């Protein structure tokens, strides 16, 4: 490997993950790209190496599998990689009434959105603390600021990511390691289709571009901000959550999700 800093990006095969990888490559980071699709990872690896002269590694891995994060960690140790930045981007949502939802999909959502993120952070941050240098970017969401009827598990996972990231940011103050929660609003990544959201949903009518969110997230991570409220919609939701009664907030969320 070259002397460039190295970053891990999970969920890197498309959408926001691929855009964050592009920003990191442009900034001179070597990359360990993690996602399920080997074909998409390989294509992104070749694109970034050709465009930016960095080194990229494709590591196909399904983070919905229990302890899949250990496979990523073993790869890091086996290659002797020094990880300077960890981007926990992998995640997905689902739409519909919880009592009618497929249990395995709900369980996998918690595994990917929460457990894998937490496990990778726990495995890699001690090395950063030892070196007194490192950055973690965790993907939360505007969904963290309200309960979300018809997307109940997804909203709950993003609230967890925000709370967890803020707490770690304070714990690690003075160690040289920063943790940032990126909270974008609706983003044009194909999320709504993957989450089986109906055509009546108003959530994505004014979505930000994935490239814009990726740039803002990188800047916040590099600045060591604990929370990045990306976009006017997210800032309005975060501000409004301080004053609007929770029963109103959850009814508003339900209207957006249906």
Image (spheres, helix red, strand yellow):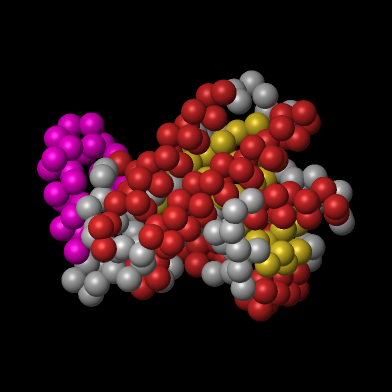
Viewer-proximal residue among 100 and 134: 100
The mark tally for this picture is 0
Residue 103 place in picture, x, y as percent: 38, 60
Where 239 falls versus 54 (above or below)?
above
Q: Nearer the viewer, residue 15 or 152?
A: 152
Q: Is 48 placed left or right of 112 in the picture?
A: right
Residue 18 in view? yes
Query: Which quadrant would the C terminus be assigned to in this image?
Result: bottom left
> At x 71% / y 64%, what residue is drawn?
59
Please tell me whether residue 254 belongs to the stretch shown in magenta.
yes
Q: Residue at x 35, y 51 (%)?
A: 153
Residue shown at 14% from the left, 49% from the top: 251
Q: Quadrant of residue 203?
A: bottom left
Asked if one can make out residue 211 in the rendered structure from this viewpoint, the answer is: no
Q: Position of residue 141 (x, y in %)?
A: 39, 49
Q: Name the residue at 78% across, 31% down.
A: 131
State left or right for residue 242 relative to residue 27. left
Q: Quadrant of the N terminus?
A: bottom right
Residue that lies at the very extreme toward the top in this rendered image: 174
- Residue 250 among those drawn in magenta: yes
- Which x, y percent locates residue 167? 49, 28
Please say if 126 is above or below 66: above
What secondary structure is the magenta-colored segment mainly?
Answer: helix
Q: Is residue 200 above or below residue 184?
A: below
Q: Which of the 4 image quarters holds residue 235?
A: top left
Please name whichever residue, 242 or 225, is drawn nearer the observer in this view of the structure: 242
User: In the image, which residues are magenta?
Assistant: 229-258
Residue 194, horizontal then vertical, whole percent: 40, 70
């Amino acid at each position: 490997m070259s002397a460039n800093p190295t970053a891990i990006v999970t969920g890197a095969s498309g959408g926001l993950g691929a855009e964050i990888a592009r920003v990191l490559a442009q900034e001179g980071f070597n990359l360990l790209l993690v996602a399920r699709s080997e074909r998409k990872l390989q294509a992104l690896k070749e694109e970034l190496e050709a465009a930016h002269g960095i080194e990229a590694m494709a590591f196909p891995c399904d983070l919905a599998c229990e302890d899949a994060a250990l496979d990523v960690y073993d790869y890091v140790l086996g290659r002797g990689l020094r990880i300077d930045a960890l981007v926990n981007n992998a995640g997905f949502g689902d739409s519909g009434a919880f009592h009618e939802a497929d249990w395995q999909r709900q369980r996998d959502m918690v595994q990917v959105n929460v457990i894998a993120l937490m496990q990778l952070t726990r495995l890699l941050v001690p090395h950063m603390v030892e070196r007194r240098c490192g950055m973690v970017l965790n993907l939360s969401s505007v969904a963290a600021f309200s309960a979300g009827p018809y997307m109940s598990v997804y909203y709950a996972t993003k609230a967890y990511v925000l709370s967890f990231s803020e707490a770690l940011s304070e714990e690690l103050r003075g160690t040289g390691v920063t943790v940032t929660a990126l909270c974008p609003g609706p983003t044009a990544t194909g999320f709504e289709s993957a989450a089986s959201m109906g055509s009546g949903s108003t959530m994505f009518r004014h979505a930000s571009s994935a490239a814009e969110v990726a740039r803002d997230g990188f800047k916040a991570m590099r600045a060591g901000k604990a929370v990045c409220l990306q976009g006017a919609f997210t800032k309005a939701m975060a501000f409004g959550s301080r004053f609007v009664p929770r029963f109103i907030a959850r009814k508003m969320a339900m209207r957006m999700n249906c």
